[in-house]
Image (cartoon, rainbow, N blue to C red):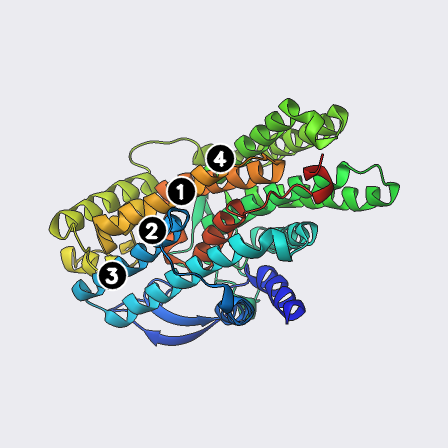
Amino acid sequence: MIALEKFLFSVFLFLLPFNIKKFLLSAAARGPLTELNALFLYLSDILLVLILALWLARSWRQLDFTFTKKKILGYSLGILIVFAIVSCFNTQNVSLSFYRILHLCLGIFLFFYIKANFTKLFDQNKILSIFTLSGVIQAFISLGQYLKQSSLGIKFLGESVLGKEIAGVAKIDFWGDKMIRAYGTFSHPNILAAFLLLCFCATILLIIRMGRDNNHAQKNKIWLLVLGLVIIILGIFLTFSRTILCLSIVAAIASFLYLYFHNLKFSISRLKLNRLLFLIMACFLGFSLIFWPQLSGRFQINPDEQALSLRIFYNQIAYQMIKKTPLIGVGIGNFIHQFENLMPKLEIWQYQPVHNIYLLIFSEIGIFGLIAFLTALFLIFKHCLKSKVYSLELIIFGIIGFAFLLIGVTDHFFFTINQGILMFWLTLGIMSSKVSLVPKNEKSQ
């Protein structure tokens, strides 16, 4: 049974980037169907439910429901779910609200599963290798979309329908023309960029873990990983996500600074670290020069830019909703419905959730739901900071987790889109693993 559970989890991780889903029901008042206004059955959900069922079957006898201080994190997340349910009393679309609650629960259950099993059940190198492979595949798909300037016809893998003339497709201005940003098999370039950031950090971690050994048989694998890292960096650039590009550089530098100050613990030479850091910085510099004509416009921030002005506008809409129902919110998943009621004459594509998960939770679930969510985040990071063994693995995933919290200030997909929800709770779960990710022979030293 455990072997089946481990196999299903590996498949789940590999298929997570592929947005394979089956349409179930429309919850849209008007306009095209999207993941924000329709109900879908995702392949990742089916796999996750099977994994959780196997976990429950082998561990239900060990469940302990007595109240202790150590379980405050669980109670905080439970309260978040409770207030998400309470918000349904104020919702306009009950089916959509319960659908969002289901996905919130799946994300939280995934968090607890990873927290309890990641270091006990799984081979970390294999898990990191899956991230690397997935990142490389997404980068190649992104390159194809960039060169073709349209979708590649792999809709069965979850690819969005893309084209320069299609309204709602994310584009950049380039010499008076429009160019589409790479989507991979995600529903938006920003979600792809966040996933590639996760793959980027996981690949750095895997290279360093394998580089600690002087085993010559590992050298070819390391070179393949280095090549994969370069391809993943290219994929990040093809999303033209300003936030992720900056966070990728910061994450790499922060990881290497930590290694330099704790080098003896990880038994890896400074020469190897310098070579890897030089390679990463050279890739970022080289791709920056290649894509500078497209990137330059992205980094010229002005108040009239649509991406910025719309975010400010959505924040104002969120404030109006919060003032109206601060305690229980407008109903989880119902931000867009309330938005349409407040301003019914906007264009269809303008109706989006506020691009800030904290304001979104406040406006949809209410102040108590937001407090529960922030309390859970505080406890997770507090747990990491109080860890007795500060492994590089813990630090890198902590950096990714913190980067995701920053991304949450400018985007909503960690709370609204299935892939984003699973990615978010997966990362927090790895951070919260009870045992350090340092190999056993190192922990004993």
First reached walking from the N terminus: tag 4 or tag 3: 3
Q: CA distance from mark 2 to mark 4?
A: 19 Å
Q: CA distance from mark 1 to mark 3?
A: 28 Å
What's the amino acid at mark 4? Lys
From the top left corner, tell me how far across and down residue 161 is, in percent.
Answer: 48, 63
- Looking at the picture, tell me which residue is in the foreground, 103 or 312: 103
What is the tally of numbered marks visible in this picture?
4
Q: Which mark is residue 386?
A: 4
What's the amino acid at mark 2? Ser
Q: Which residue is mark 1?
A: 379
From the top left corner, tell me how far across and down residue 141 is, in percent.
Answer: 60, 56
First reached walking from the N terminus: tag 1 or tag 4: 1
Is there any visible trace of residue 399 in the rendered image? yes
Cβ atoms at labels 1 and 3 below 8 Å apart: no
Cβ atoms at labels 1 and 2 below 8 Å apart: yes
Secondary structure type for disc 4: loop
The quarter in which the C terminus is drawn is top right
Seen at 57% across and 56% down, the residue is 117
Q: CA distance from mark 1 to mark 4?
A: 10 Å
Q: Which residue is mark 3?
A: 334
Seen at 61% across and 36% down, the residue is 391
The crowding category of the residue bearing disc 4, from other C-alpha atoms within 10 Å (few below 14, some 14 to 19, many at least 20), is few
Q: Which mark is residue 76?
A: 2
What's the amino acid at mark 3? Asn
First reached walking from the N terminus: tag 1 or tag 3: 3
- Looking at the picture, tell me which residue is in the foreground, 151 or 12: 12
Is there any visible trace of residue 294 in the rendered image? no
From the top left corner, tell me how far across and down residue 205 is, in percent.
Answer: 65, 40
